[in-house]
Amino acid sequence: MERTAVRSTEIAIVGYDQSSKKLEIAFRTGSVYHYEDVPQEIYEGLIRAKSVGTYFAEYVKNTYSYVKMH
């Protein structure tokens, strides 16, 4: 999984696995979530967003199913 540190007050790292379409969001609180069946365009938009937190809330948070890893 490719991981990228992002500038955000809430999100620390964003990861993406192209083969499984799994998006990993690591929050600054220490919580890590894996979002399922996320298109690569959403991942790319997230890491390029002016506000990562706003993009996440608008396009990912209530759109894709997820598993809390820790």
Image: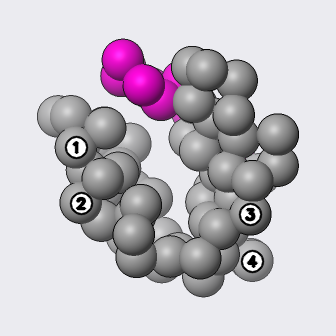
What label does residue 58 carry, if any? 2
Query: Vertically, is 17 above or below 53?
Result: below
Q: Badge 1 is on which residue? A: 54
Residue occupying the far bottom of the picture: 37
Q: Which amino acid type is shown beneath numbered disc 3?
A: Val
Gap in angstroms between the C-alphas marked 1 and 4: 25 Å
Q: Secondary structure at mark 1?
A: helix
**Residue 32 at what x, y percent from top left?**
71, 41
Q: Nearer the viewer, residue 21 or 70?
A: 70
Q: Badge 4 is on which residue? A: 20
In magenta stretch: residue 11:
yes
Q: Quadrant of the C terminus?
A: top right
Q: Secondary structure at mark 2?
A: helix
Q: Which amino acid type is shown beneath numbered disc 4?
A: Ser
Q: Please say if the residues under marks 1 and 2 sit with CB atoms less than 8 Å apart.
A: yes
Mark 2 Cα-neighbour bin, 10 Å: few <14, some 14–19, many ≥20 = few
